[in-house]
């Protein structure tokens, strides 16, 4: 085989490896970006806490709740519009969803907080957004979210001006992964020191 043919073969092989690598990276980009957001709070992505907060500061902060739907025939709204808690305080809030369709519908909630820079400090202990929800025709459920604002937010000089956080959820349709499941609702991990509110 000539030297030129060998060079051409190496070039073709190298280009093939590059193409395969680019395709693989494109498939990995979405989960890697999602992981990046969850770790850093980028784009207002909230954190998942393994345990409840044990430290409460004197700093008050308001949490507002927002609800939207995309292409799913549900009535979806927060039961409470706004609460006021202390930073580090374990809190419990609820959302209500009603299936207005004549058939069962399954949905999953996406979420974020604003201001976006707060995402790294807003920690959810348990949330209905962790699993898909299936509602029968006309069925209504109340879904909890247990959370706290991480006390380390007080150490961030860029967040000293934050007095209100808005927690937003958007439900969109999904195909049920387990159509036979009777599971309808996530129960919050509550205990002494938790607070819940009625509509304000």
Image (cartoon, rainbow, N blue to C red):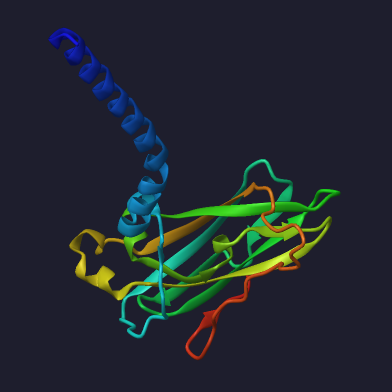
- Tell me where residue 196 appears, x and y as whole percent: 56, 79
Determine which quarter of the picture holds residue 109: bottom right
State the image coordinates of residue 16 (x, y, percent, origin top left): 31, 23
Residue 73 vs 128, above or below: the answer is above
* 38 and 16: which is toward the camera: 16
Q: What residue is shown at x 17% (from left), y 14% (from top)?
A: 7
Please tell me which residue is depicted at 32% across the width and 84% down the height of the picture. 55
- Residue 51 in view here: yes
Tell me: 14 left or right of 48. left
Relative to residue 161, is residue 125 drawn left or right? right
The residue at the point 20 percent across, 10 percent down is: 5
Above or below, comparing residue 35 to residue 151 in the picture: above
> Which quadrant does the C terminus fall into?
bottom right
State the image coordinates of residue 130 (x, y, percent, origin top left).
54, 62
Inspect this view and state whether residue 200 appears: no
As drawn, which residue projects farthest toward the right?
A: 102
Residue extending furthest toward the bottom: 192
Query: In which image quadrant can residue 133 be found?
Result: bottom right
């Amino acid at each position: 085989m000539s030297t030129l043919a060998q060079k051409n073969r190496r070039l073709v092989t190298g280009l093939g490896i590059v193409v395969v690598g680019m395709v693989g990276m494109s498939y990995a980009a979405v989960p890697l970006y999602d992981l990046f957001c969850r770790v850093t709070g980028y784009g207002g992505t909230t954190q998942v806490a393994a345990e409840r907060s044990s430290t409460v500061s004197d700093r008050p902060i308001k949490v507002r709740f927002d609800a939207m739907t995309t292409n799913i025939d549900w009535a979806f709204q927060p039961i409470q519009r706004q609460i006021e808690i202390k930073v580090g305080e374990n809190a419990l809030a609820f959302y209500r969803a009603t299936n207005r369709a004549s058939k069962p519908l399954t949905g999953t909630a996406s979420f974020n907080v604003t201001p976006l820079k707060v995402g790294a400090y807003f920690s959810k202990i348990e949330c209905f957004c962790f699993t898909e929800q299936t509602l029968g025709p006309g069925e209504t459920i109340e879904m909890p979210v247990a959370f706290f604002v991480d006390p380390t937010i007080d150490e961030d000089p860029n967040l000293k001006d934050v007095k209100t956080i808005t927690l937003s959820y958007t439900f969109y349709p999904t195909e049920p992964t387990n159509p036979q499941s009777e599971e309808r609702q996530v129960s919050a991990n509550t205990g002494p020191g938790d607070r819940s509110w009625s509509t304000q």
